[in-house]
Amino acid sequence: MEKNNLWKNLLYTFLGTTLSILLTFGTSQWLALQKQKEERELTALMVMGSIEKFAQDLEQNADDLTWHDTLATYLLNIPIDSLDSPQYDSIGKYLSLLLAFNTLSHDRSAESIFSNSIETWKNLGSFSFIENVGHCFAHINLIEERYEKFFTDENDEIEKRITMNPDAYPGRTLASKLMHDAQFRKYLSRIHGRISQCRYGVAFIRQENAVNMRLMNVQEKDVKDFIDKNAQGIEADEVVQTDFYTPHINSDSLPDFQTWFNQHQW
């Protein structure tokens, strides 16, 4: 009888130990999987938040450029043969303000984190998400490159050309020489079109990011809340827009320059 009890106790002990090991191992595995899931969700939110933040910055820049476009219209409306007259001595100040464009760049940390974890996403079979996020960042990088080229490189090249050989160009001051220059005048007239391109870029990026959200079953509100929590994000009004072209400003419809400038200068 005692022998039977001994074997029974040993069996219970063995079963209890085995069950404890299985529960411990199973719990550890479950916790590890939960942690991986949470990390993937956080990475996805970081990626989509970074994309949306760039769209917000690009949208803000497009809004700010309308001021530059109007100022350019005023300056281009000055008769060329009057550029060196005393009444336009302050043209240099206005050009400095006009050419002080906002920069544009996105936080590359989320892009880097995502790139370094691509193998994990592949193992999960999230190929559509990988591909779409890749499209988003490729488009963002292209927008940044084109923005930098136009708003920094092009006007720098024109100014350098004139300052390297000032006597070859008409005008009493550098500002006057710039406003006499046909290439520079064309450059100023192209600011208007860049606003439309920026707004198209905003709509395209948000459309692609909406696909990312659907693939990860994430709501737009969650992405914007993430931005607000981690970067004190800018709230952006949702505007559905299909036509990004607007007519050039009619100089005849503008108020007196000094009145407009005093009301809108930053």
Image (spheres, rainbow, N blue to C red):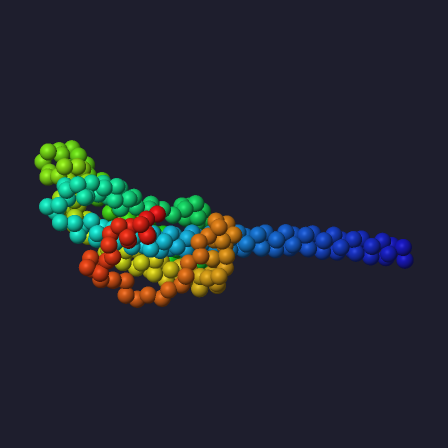
Residue 232 at least partly seen:
yes
Q: Where is residue 119 in the image (x, y as percent from the top left)?
A: 44, 50
155 displayed left or right of 111: left
User: Which residue occupies the foreground of this view, 237 or 37?
Assistant: 237
**Quarter assignment of residue 49:** bottom left
Query: In the rendered view, would you say 79 is above or below 240?
Result: above
Q: Residue at x 61, y 55 (%)?
A: 30
Q: Which residue is drawn at 44% across and 64% down?
A: 214
Q: Where is residue 194 in the image (x, y as percent from the top left)?
A: 25, 54
Q: In which quarter of the image is the N terminus?
A: bottom right
Q: Residue at x 19, y 43 (%)?
A: 88
Query: In the rendered view, would you say 23 is above or below 160?
Result: below
33 displayed left or right of 147: right
User: Which residue occupies the foreground of this view, 41 or 51?
Assistant: 51
User: Which residue occupies the foreground of this view, 81 or 53?
Assistant: 81
Residue 157 at least partly seen:
no
199 displayed left or right of 182: right
